[in-house]
């Protein structure tokens, strides 16, 4: 088996002897993985070697947006100079000062937060005033701030902290369990152009996802344990780009509820859901594909550990409560890791994720997803970003009507995380 000719067209290389085919297939697999690895290394090297100038004006705008959105506070006294953020206590009237300081301390480029009990004198440098209280940035940010301005060091956004959370909130911002980078079936908005290797059915395909995870309530249990609950829903569509009208191949839906916890560097999420899968009309008409009656209700859970701001590892499993066809094996396991660069280049952060899933139905054969690329973080809203990723997958298809097919593809995708 050999992949299609390079360059993404729908052309196939000529058939040759089986030994050569096997060698070519293995070579292409290695090439795909090496391509993503080299991309991540080159992006990381560029980011570490290049100096992205830390802009105090950018940081001040970021801080002002956070104050307005999260705390409904307008602060005319807000100043940022060389990473030192100052704000008059009088501007925080009616807001929880401790939560405000904690949120501001976590912002990229902020080395220290100073709350002035009296406004600074005109012309005084930032931080020079009468009695004040200060809040140092947390360790993840402090380590990055030790570099001089312009070093390009910018730790990834810290997880939500207990000081940021009231005892009870409705429709809170952010997520306690942050979205997974490489899971092909994690609810998100995005699209990927995939090129399938040596596939008798698919060549170039567009995969579109529409979905999100929405927390409804959040609160604190004690001083350190955070909890939240909400809903999640998504739709994943597969379109044949080699056809004249981008025919719909497969459409999957998922909807359900979730609960999540965070305690320090640990976080976890448990979900219950219904999933159904549907075959496109053109697929039935043009290719005479037989529809599978495949749907289920299930539950799954994952636990993640983030020892440093740049690393996350996770593991979990799932069980199907009701499934059609009834002989479908119910158990599954999952695990993975994510790396986020400590530095940014032109506000782009190199990222790498690996997700591995194994299902009893497939005799525990792994479904491997690798994604690498860059993440553009929002200067306005915490936790909101755009990802441009090279994606590699091998294993049984995640597309419901074709779960029995073993596939391999390389793709280029853009994803929006809210």
Image (spheres, rainbow, N blue to C red):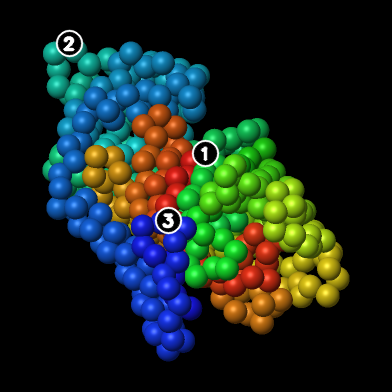
- Label 3 and label 2: CA atoms lie apart by 65 Å
- Give residue 325's position: percent from left, percent from top: 83, 68
Q: Which mark is on residue 178?
A: none
Q: Nearer the viewer, mark 1 or mark 3?
A: 3
- Label 2 and label 1: CA atoms lie apart by 40 Å
User: With respect to residue 359, does 47 lie above or below?
Assistant: above
Q: Are marks 2 and 1 in contact (CB under 8 Å)?
A: no
**Numbered disc total:** 3
- Label 1 and label 3: CA atoms lie apart by 34 Å
Residue holding disc 2: 122
Q: Residue at x 79, y 73 (%)?
A: 328
Residue holding disc 3: 9
Left or right: 25 as drawn, with respect to 117: right
What kind of element bears circle 3?
loop
Residue 126 visible in the current orientation: yes
Left or right: 400 as drawn, with respect to 93: right
Which residue, as the protein is rendered here, is positioned at the far bottom? Answer: 19
Residue holding disc 1: 418
Q: Nearer the viewer, mark 2 or mark 1?
A: 1
Left or right: 152 as drawn, with respect to 316: left
Q: Residue at x 37, y 17 (%)?
A: 75
- Give residue 408's position: percent from left, percent from top: 51, 68
Q: Residues within 10 Å of mark 3 (few under 14, many from 20)?
A: few
Q: Quadrant of residue 371?
A: bottom left
């Amino acid at each position: 088996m050999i992949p299609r000719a390079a360059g993404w067209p729908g052309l196939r290389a000529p058939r040759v002897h089986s030994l050569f085919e096997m060698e070519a297939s293995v070579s292409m697999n290695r090439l795909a993985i090496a391509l993503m690895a080299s991309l991540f290394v080159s992006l990381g090297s560029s980011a570490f070697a290049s100096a992205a100038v830390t802009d105090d004006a950018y940081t001040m705008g970021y801080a002002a947006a956070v104050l307005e959105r999260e705390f409904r506070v307008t602060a005319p006294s807000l100043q940022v100079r060389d990473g030192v953020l100052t704000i008059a206590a009088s501007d925080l009237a009616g807001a929880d000062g401790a939560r405000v300081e904690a949120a501001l301390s976590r912002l990229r480029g902020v080395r220290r937060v100073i709350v002035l009990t009296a406004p600074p004198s005109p012309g005084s440098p930032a931080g020079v005033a009468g009695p004040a209280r200060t809040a140092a940035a947390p360790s993840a940010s402090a380590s990055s701030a030790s570099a001089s301005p312009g070093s390009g060091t910018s730790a990834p956004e810290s997880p939500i902290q207990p000081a940021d959370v009231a005892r009870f909130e409705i429709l809170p911002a952010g997520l306690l369990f942050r979205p997974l980078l490489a899971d092909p079936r994690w609810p998100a908005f995005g699209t990927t152009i995939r090129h399938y290797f040596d596939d008798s059915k698919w060549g170039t395909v567009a995969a579109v996802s529409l979905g999100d995870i929405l927390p409804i309530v959040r609160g604190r249990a004690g001083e350190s344990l955070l909890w939240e609950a909400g809903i999640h829903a998504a739709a994943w569509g597969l379109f044949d780009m080699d056809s004249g009208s981008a025919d719909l191949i497969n459409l999957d839906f998922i909807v359900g509820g979730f609960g999540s916890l965070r305690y320090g560097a640990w976080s976890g999420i448990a979900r219950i859901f219904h999933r159904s899968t549907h075959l496109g009309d053109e697929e039935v008409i043009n290719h005479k594909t037989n529809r599978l009656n495949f749907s289920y209700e299930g539950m799954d859970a994952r636990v993640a550990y983030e020892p440093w701001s740049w690393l996350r590892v996770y593991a979990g499993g799932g069980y199907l409560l009701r499934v059609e066809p009834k002989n479908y094996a119910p158990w599954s396991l999952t695990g993975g890791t994510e790396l986020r660069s400590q530095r940014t280049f032109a506000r782009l952060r190199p990222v790498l994720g690996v997700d591995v899933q194994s299902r009893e139905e497939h005799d525990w054969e792994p479904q491997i997803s690798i994604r690498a690329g860059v993440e553009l973080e929002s200067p306005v809203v915490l936790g909101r970003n755009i990802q441009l990723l090279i994606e590699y997958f091998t294993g049984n298809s995640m597309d419901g009507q074709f779960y029995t097919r073993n596939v391999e593809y390389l793709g280029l995708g853009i994803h929006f995380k809210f």
